[in-house]
Image (cartoon, grey):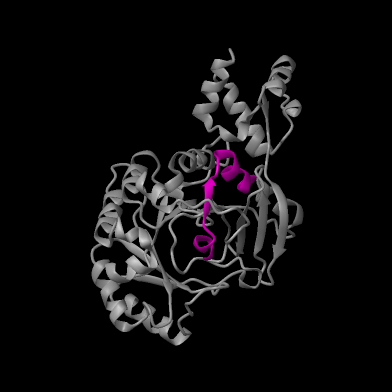
Amino acid sequence: MNKVNLLNFHRHALEEWFITQGEQRFRAQQVLKWLYQVGTDNIAKMSNLSKPLREKLTTLAEIKYPEIALEHLSADGTYKWLLRLDDGNCIEMVFIPEANRGTLCISSQVGCALDCRFCSTAQQGFNRNLTVAEIVSQVVIASRMLGKKSKDDRIVSNIVLMGMGEPLLNFDNVVNAIDIFLDDCAYGLSKRRVTLSTSGIVPALKRLREVCDVSLAISLHAANNTLRDELVPINKKYPIEALLGACRYYLAGENTHIKKVTIEYVMLEGINDSPADAKALIKILNKLPVKVNLIPFNVFPSSVYRCSSQKVINTFRDMLIKAGIVTITRKTRGEDIDAACGQLAGKFKDKTKRNLVIERM
C-alpha cells in the first residue's frame, strides 16, 4: 500500500483524513505541531499520540522531503539550494538574510509555462506542478539548514512565492501550502509575511481573493500592451487593463488586510527604461494603491537583454517618487551564485505544452 505524505495535508484535509481512519479530528492539530513547530520527521517520536496510533500512522503515512542536491553560499550571505524531487527533476530555492528579516524565495512549479523573455526559468521550459508537500518542504528544509549553520540565529520570517513557476497556474496546491504557512498549528505567519507573485492569471487572481488574501506582487515590466505582449506573453490573454482591474478587485475584499499591491518592474536597457516609459507607468498606476520595486536585470546565458545603467534606474525611480508612487530599487542579492531575481533554473526535462497550460485558466 502506498503511504500518504503527511506534508501534503493542510489542517482541514488532515482532519478529514483522520476521520476516514476512524480517529478524532483534533489529531490533525497535534500532528501539524510535530511537523512544523517541533520539526520531527519521525512519527514514532510524536509522544502525545498513543502508541497504537503511532504504529497505525507508521503503516499508513510517511514524512518525506526532497533531497538537497547542491547548496551554494553567496559572498553576501544569500543561500541557494538545488532540491532533487522523487522523479529526478530539480528545483531551486533561495534564502535572503537581512537585518530585520529572513526571506525565503520558493518555487511552485518545475519550470514555468509562461515564457517570459527575460526570465531564465521560463527559457528552460515546463515539466509539472509541485505538490503541496514539495512546496512546503522547501520551508522545512531551509529552516533546518539555517538552524544548523546560522551563527546569528537567522530564521525564515518571510516567504515569497517568486521562485520557479507561476503560482496561480498551480492554484490549489499553492493555496493549500499557504494555509500551512499561516496556520497557528504550523508556521503561524502573518498574511503580510507571505507574498505571492504572479504574471497575471486574471481569473485565478480574482479567485485568490475569495480564499486567501496574502500579500500580492504583480510581475508587470511594461506600461503598454504592445511591449508587455513581447516581454510577458500571457499579456496577450490577460492585458494590462484586465490585470490592473483584478488588482483593484483584490484590494476591495471586505476582509482583506492588504492595502497596496507591489508592482515588479525589471529594468531592461533601451527596452522599458526611458522617461516616456516612466510617464506611461505613472499614468496606468494612477489611483491604484501600489509600491513599485524596480529590479535591475540579472543576465543569464542566452539572454538578449542588458541591465539599465544605475543612472537610468535612478532617473526612472525619481520620476515615480515625484509622482507620489512609493518606489525602491531592489538590491541584487546572490548574483555570484545565480540566485538573483530571474536567474533560477533548476534541472528538469522540458515537457512544455504552454498553450494547453494557459488555456486551462
Q: Is residue 129 left or right of residue 139?
A: left
Residue 78, quarter of picture: bottom right
Q: Is residue 126 magenta?
A: yes
Q: Residue at x 39, y 68 (%)?
A: 231
Toward the viewer: 65 or 103? 65
Q: Which residues are magenta?
A: 120-140
- Whole-percent x and y of residue 243? 29, 57
Q: Is residue 105 visible to us here? A: yes
- In what quadrant of the picture does the C terminus appear? top left
Q: Is residue 122 magenta?
A: yes
Toward the viewer: 150 or 345? 345
Q: Residue at x 75, y 56 (%)?
A: 149
- Whole-percent x and y of residue 208? 37, 44
From the viewer's perspective, is residue 357 above or below residue 184? below
From the viewer's perspective, is residue 234 above or below residue 66? below
Q: Residue at x 39, y 83 (%)?
A: 270
